[in-house]
Image (cartoon, rainbow, N blue to C red):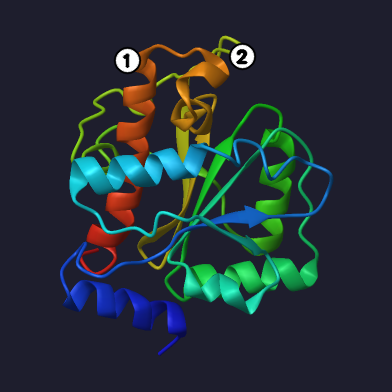
Amino acid sequence: MPRILLLFALLFSLGTYGQSYEIALLKYQGGGDWYANLETSLPNLIAFCNSEMGMNINEEQAVVEASSVEIFDYPFIHMTGHGNVIFNQEEAENLRNYLLAGGFLHIDDNYGMDQFIRRELKKIFPNEELVELPYSHPIYHQEYDFNNGLPKIHEHDEKPSQGFGIIKNGRLVVFYSYESDLGDGWEDPEIHNDSEASRLKALQMGANIISYVFTSQFSE
């Protein structure tokens, strides 16, 4: 059994949140700022998940490269940025193997990466398309209900926020949050001056995504 599935099996056997685990930020090539929101975004989301939902996530986020074998140590990988993304053949194959082995990738467009990430996802899954998830999808209805889908945290081009996914073998392996900017909403309040209501929505939706990964892994 691949290492990532062994990790999921252990977590599941100990209860959904019983075993401590770590999540990671994906470092990629191409010139885009993979490190956007690095200092407080994921750490604040982790703290929220632990305090409000009783999760047991390691307080320290990891940083992992797309080509590394270490990626298989993390059941949840987060990716963000504003610009260009490039996966070479080795990286695309490694990410494909990771996702097919039970891993999960959340991509959060921080504004400006859409055209690039759509192109690069085709390298990972050439025959798959990003599909918009219906508002009834379980990812919007974990601990918190989002009956209208992704919350709108930051306004950029007056477009609605949308949640897209790639589904393989009946399992959601990639979730792409577009025109929402969840990661900015996870950051410390003084960075973007978001309202407490907006930040709370962003944190709740982020918690839903993480919760979905672990509660759905063996139920779908």
Q: Where is residue 116 in the image (x, y as percent from the top left)?
A: 74, 41
130 relative to 52 in the view: left or right: right
Does the CB distance between marks 2 and 1 fall below 8 Å?
Answer: no
- Secondary structure beneath dot 2 equals loop
- Secondary structure beneath dot 1 equals helix
206 relative to 18 in the view: left or right: right
Position of residue 32 relative to residue 194, above or below, is below
Q: Where is residue 140 in the image (x, y as percent from the top left)?
A: 28, 37
User: From the viewer's perspective, is the residue at label 2 or at label 1 nearer?
Assistant: 1
Between 91 and 58, the one lying in front of the other is 58
Mark yes or no: residue 132 visible: no
Which of the numbered marks, if any, corresponds to residue 197? 1
* Kind of residue indicated by mark 2: His
Distance between mark 2 and mark 1 Cα atoms? 19 Å
Between 177 and 171, the one lying in front of the other is 177
Callout 1: few (<14), some (14-19), or many (20+) C-alpha neighbours within 10 Å?
few
Q: Which of marks 2 and 1 is nearer the N terminus?
A: 2
Query: On the rendered image, what quadrant is the C terminus found in?
Result: bottom left
Q: Quadrant of residue 71?
A: bottom right
Between 216 and 188, the one lying in front of the other is 188
Position of residue 193 relative to residue 20, above or below, is above
Position of residue 117 relative to residue 105, above or below, is above
Residue depicted at x 28% and y 61%: 214
Between 130 and 78, the one lying in front of the other is 78
Residue depicted at x 76% and y 35%: 83
Residue under pointer 2:
156
Mark yes or no: residue 20 visible: yes
Q: Position of residue 38 (x, y in %)?
A: 60, 42
